[in-house]
Amino acid sequence: MGWFRYASGDDSAGVHGAFVSVLRESDRRAAGGGVLLTERHLLTCAHVVNVALGKELLAPADPGPVRIGAVFPGTGSRAPHEARVAHWVPPRRTGGGLDWSGDLAVLELDAPAPAVPPRWSEMVPGQGVRAWHGGGHAATFVEVMVKECDGWIGYVDGELSGAAIGPGYSGGPLWSEREGAFVGLVAAQLQAPDGPLAAHHVVRRGWAIPWQAVRAELESAGAGPLLAATGDGAEDAQRVPHQLLLPLAALLSDPAERADKARRVAEQCGLHALDDGSAPTYEELAAVLAEYPRALPSLTEVLVPTAHSSAARDAVDTLHATGPLAAGSRLLSYTEHHYLLALLRQHAKADPALLPRAARGALAYAELPQPVRAARIAPEAVEAAVDALEELGDSGRVPDGTPRVPALLRVAEYVAAALDGAAGDELCGWSDQVATRLGIHPAALAERRRDAEEWASSRHTDSGGTVVRLTRRPGDPSGAYRCTVWRMAPDGTATRASTGKDRPLSGPEIAGLVRDAVAPDDEEAPLVEVVVDRDALQLPVDEWRETEPDDTDPYGIFAPAALGADFRVVLRCPELRRRSPTGAADLRRRWAGCRTEETLAVDELIGDVRALKDTLNRTRQRSTGRVVLHGPVARRIQLLQVCLFMGVPVVLWDRTAAGRDDGRHLDEIDSAGPLDSLPERVRDFRVGVYADSERTARPSLVWEDPDRPLPGGLWLADPVAMTEEK
């Protein structure tokens, strides 16, 4: 890089930060290694993914839309990240049987990685390279030498001392300190076959996939666009540095000033710079700005205080406009990013719900990225949330010719508005500095600040509730459901809070997803609406809890309560009503009748399905909106479906009742009492029966409020197709 030098030692160069541990699905331990390819993509061996999924080592089949866990151990965090297989190059056996070709997988992360993508260079004979075990611990390093490399396979030998490449090293990157770059991936330890080679001949020999082979394979697999972001000298990556040259020349024509500013940027990027009185060329500086995601905002941060003329400010604005064209370019400088994280982690520790609540308020009509969808964000998850918010577009109207207010700044203003005194002022001060660097008009930021203050003064909490959709597909295990969670705003708009990883989940796993997504409410227990098909109306969703008491907590002091104790859990089943040609009108009419008509008690005395339909069709019962079901289980299930088909919006029953005599167990709920508080009365009743082993009643409540629309996707499928819904 000429004037800029990579810091000595692989750790300083960010190598450990880019290292990835690919986790086994079975026990979440390392299946092998990997490496960051772009800010959102990981590179590993296909056979490492097979190991992670418990499949045969060299199975060629693309695993499809599965979820793979990954950890960045070099960042100091063991928090797993979720990724999916984006590109698959299957292992292909060669004729000799000693090695194979292909064997690559690119995994796409749900959120930006907490590390900087590294540089890559070609593998050549004579390079000394370093590898690590898939667990990523620094002590597992192995020093080997590239003995042979034909561009497709590289053979590496280690000395007969120290660690050796072995199981668990596959997929990990090979680092060349001389090149200041990764040069390939570990593929396998060479095993002696039957024939001229014996075990002692290959005890320290492994083989690797050179970078030039990785590049060729990925281009053939359709992943070529990703290579422009690898610092590999790809043609597309060179366009951005060229576009940066003119504004850099206008701002830093003085070599001494250019050297000073470049040295400050290099320090933040973890680079060394020459200290011989020389200055970098514009091309050298542009290359660093294009390679390091926060380098360009870090440079403009030191340029803005001295950009007094309109020409200088125009040049800074040109840099800002050009920056997003660079692969992985970020909004914040290194110092802005670190300072914001420190503030938000402090506030997340005091109130984990503050940041996601502010994001929902500031970006009410935007689809929030996955790291911000949870109802609570712990301090260790703040960085992923901030990085994801950096990627969102800018907000509404601003004075002509001035930049828009980024979504991240708007969220910061809402967090500040919810804080008191100095804490809010400190965050506003940070926002002012970033806005000044970006050239945002003060009036635009002031308008967003007023919006935040109005939001904070009205109400900090959500009152829209949470919608949980449970579905099954053919072949799913008994008792397991696929789960999608939406968070509903008071105006009926929905944002997806969780997808449940698109696999069947147990009750405790679903309870964990729901707890992560439910927004707090200062005034009442949050409402959780569980949408099911008719075959799942008897599910004890309200009894599901994330964990049970164990030996370390025998009394359950720290274990979360059942969902029905903390939340107003109700059921919804639009499937049956959609089968009726008058279903929507019936629901509206009977919902109005919930406040004026008497509650209808239905038991075995009603007779059969036909008798109940006739009863609900009678003139005096056409507006009946509340029904309490009694009687034997089989008959009760049939009569429940009749009620829902006929548009009855509120149905209460006891899942454990054996007959009509058990109906008295629900008297305490007062089903005929005030309508609006019925879900809360059911919740309060559940709290009592959960705590008393002598009480067996377990109430279920269907609550179909027509003024609470469901997310659009829940209305599209017919009852048969619903079992196949993702």
Image (tube, grey):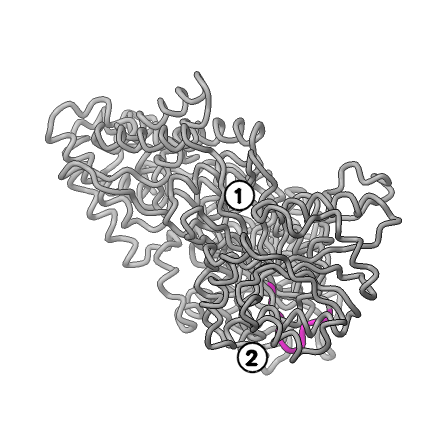
Q: Give the magenta part as a residue range.
A: 470-478
How many numbered marks have been drawn onto this rendered protein structure?
2
* Residue ID at (63%, 43%): 78
Residue found at the very far front of the displayed protein: 620
Residue 720 image label: 2
Residue 90 percent location from the top left of the image? 54, 74
Q: Is residue 368 above or below residue 604?
A: above
Of residues 720 and 327, the one drawn nearer to the viewer in this rendering: 720
In the figure, 245 relative to 506: above or below?
above
Left or right: residue 222 versus residue 33 is: left
21, 631: nearer the viewer: 631
Residue at x 50% of width, y 73% of height? 578
Q: Main secondary structure of the magenta part?
A: loop
Disc 2 to disc 1, C-alpha distance: 48 Å
The answer to whether residue 439 is visible is no
Whether 231 is drawn above or below 455: the answer is below
Q: Which residue, given by chain and number where applicable, does mark 1 sit on?
A: 17
Give amino acid for label 2.
Val
Left or right of residue 232: residue 721: right
Q: Residue furthest top?
A: 422
Asked if residue 575 lies left or right of residue 695, the reply is left
Question: Along the line of sight, which residue is nearer the eye, 644 or 345?
Answer: 644
Q: Residue flagged by tag 1: what amino acid is it?
A: Gly
Which class describes the residues within 10 Å of circle 1: few (<14), some (14-19), or many (20+)? Answer: many
